[in-house]
């Protein structure tokens, strides 16, 4: 399976920016009061937050990833396909989310409320998709 450029870009952006913010915050804690000095370079950390929101908040990108994966899951289950090797966790999360959303019975407003109510599963699905995508690129 070849990864599309926008697909890879979204996942890479989320992971790169979030990891950079986390690592810089930890470094700032490690160096202590030095981080407060104007010449330390830590004054530029707000740039990372700008990066986070430049193409859309990471959470919005993750919601789009989960939405796209659920669409793929719907077509897979419709055609009777099983989980592809390496995508078992995604398939499991899609199944759980699909079950939770099924009570909407096509009502988009109810479906949106159920999607929001199951936010942990939605974000876990996005994390699983990103992990698989990055693993494919690196290995």
Image (tube, grey):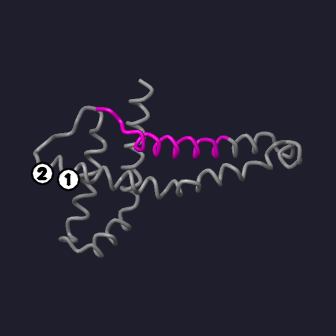
Outermost residue, top side: 139
Which mark is on residue 113? none
Q: Are marks 2 and 1 in contact (CB under 8 Å)?
A: yes
Quadrant including the C terminus: top left
Q: Nearer the viewer, residue 85 or 17?
A: 17
Residue 96: say if magenta: no
Where is residue 89 shown, x and y percent of the image?
A: 30, 42
The residue tagged with tag 1: helix, strand or loop? helix
The dominant secondary structure in magenta is helix
Image position of 40 with respect to 1: above or below: below
Res 105 quadrant in image: bottom left
| Element at label 2 | helix
Classify residue 133 by image quadrant.
top left
> Horizontally, is 64 left or right of 54 in the view?
left
Q: Residue at x 80, y 40 (%)?
A: 31
Q: In 3D space, how far apart are the residues under numbered discs 2 and 1 (Cα atoms)?
A: 6 Å
Q: Residue at x 28, y 57 (%)?
A: 97
Range shown magenta: 1-23
Residue 64: image location, x then y, percent: 39, 55
Q: Which residue is mark 1?
A: 74
- The residue depicted at 23 percent of the width and 58 percent of the height is 98
Q: Is residue 21 magenta?
A: yes
Left or right for 76, reference 35: left
Q: Residue at x 38, y 36 (%)?
A: 132
In this rendering, is residue 53 above or below 112? above
**Quadrant where the image shows the N terminus:** top left
Residue found at the very far front of the displayed protein: 5
Horizontal relation, residue 29 to residue 85: left or right: right
Q: Which dot marks residue 78? A: 2
């Amino acid at each position: 399976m070849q990864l599309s450029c926008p697909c890879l870009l979204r996942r890479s952006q989320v992971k790169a920016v979030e990891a950079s913010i986390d690592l810089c915050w930890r470094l700032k804690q490690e160096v202590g009061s030095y981080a407060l000095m104007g010449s330390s370079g830590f004054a530029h950390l707000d740039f990372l937050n700008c990066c986070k929101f430049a193409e859309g908040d990471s959470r919005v990108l993750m919601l789009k990833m989960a939405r796209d994966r659920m669409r793929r899951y719907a077509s897979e289950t419709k055609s009777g396909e099983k989980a592809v090797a390496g995508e078992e966790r995604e398939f499991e999360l899609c199944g759980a989310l699909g079950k939770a959303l099924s009570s909407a019975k096509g009502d988009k407003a109810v479906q949106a409320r159920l999607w929001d109510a199951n936010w942990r599963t939605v974000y876990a699905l996005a994390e699983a998709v990103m992990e698989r995508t990055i693993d494919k690129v690196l290995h």
